[in-house]
Amino acid sequence: MRVAVIGLGAMGLPMARRILAAGHDVTAWDLSVARRNEALGITLVERGSRGAEVIVLSLPHDDAVRGAAETILTSGPAPGCVVLDCSTVAPETPRALAPRFAEAGLAWVDAPVSGGPAGAAAGTLTVMAGAEPGVLDRARPVLDAIAGKVVHVGGPGAGAVAKLVNNLLVAAHLLTAAEALRMGVRAGVDLEALLAVVNGASGRSAATEVNFPRWIASGAFDSGFTAGLMRKDLRLAAALAEAQGGAGPVSQSVLAAWAESAVTNGADFNRVAEAVFRDE
């Protein structure tokens, strides 16, 4: 298939490489010259979408996605082209764009992903897809190249909702895991032993199974996802909750803790949990 990838950041570039390795004809684009220079072996084309049968977006925020959408509509993608927007955006964005693309004979799928840069490189991402029935089948060869699991959540916007639910939980689990583990260590139990117990019991989560051993306890902090990006996602989650009547007290405390943390936006998002664990 002719596939275009727009956005060659921590997620977009490894996804583009996976799609290329699967035998597809890949073109790509990124505003950053440095990122374009990293895209060895991938044909770089201005905006990267002309003639594409599937377009993958991996962009940092709603404004960038909406700008890319306007470019795609005027750039001449193949008839019936499917846009897979793997960005994390507000549900209103795909709900506004999907009808416009349908009117143009194209298809828009909100397809945010979970799994981080490592999952993108390994082709094991989980895709949370919001689309009209049948649309995903048209992009299946590309989805198979980047994902280990594709969940069709519902119509346009449903994937975006699911991603915000997921990331609110991730943010909460990191903070509660950090507090609980801090309590255990201060009470005299080794961190590694605590993680072994929790991960074999009902208290386990991705925070204890992956984040703490891989990035926090190890001191690696190279997940590829920043505190700023998590804060952006949490602002979107807060807006979604507000539209449903407001966030509850637990969610409010999580949102406040992330907003008020002294960890800078450019730091790895696991640093926020480390600061709680260290009581800094």
Image (tube, rainbow, N blue to C red):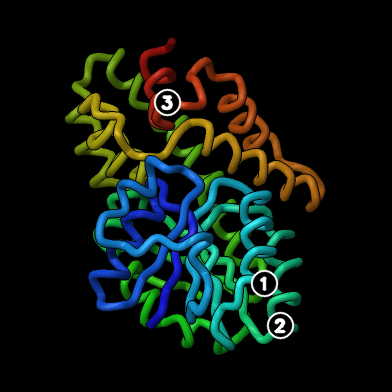
On the image, numbered disc 3 is attached to which residue?
A: 267
Relative to 141, say whether 98 is above or below: above
User: Which residue type does callout 2 highlight?
Assistant: Ala
- In front of the other: 257 or 179: 257
Of pointers 2 and 1, the one earlier in the residue sequence = 1
C-alpha gap between disc 2 and disc 3: 41 Å
Q: Are marks 2 and 1 in contact (CB under 8 Å)?
A: yes
Q: Is residue 134 left or right of residue 235?
A: left
Residue count near mark 1 (Cα–Cα under 10 Å), binned few <14, some 14–19, many ≥20: some
Local SS, label 3 = loop
Q: Identify residue type, mark 1.
A: Leu
Q: Quadrant of residue 26?
A: bottom left
Instruction: Tell me the residue that label 2 is attached to.
Output: 104
Q: Residue at the spot x=47%, y=87% of the render?
A: 137
Q: Secondary structure at mark 1?
A: helix
Pointer 2 with pointer 3, Cβ within 8 A: no
Q: Badge 1 is on which residue?
A: 73
Q: Is residue 226 left or right of residue 222?
A: right
The amino acid sitting under disc 3 is Ala
- Residue 44's quadrant in the figure? bottom left
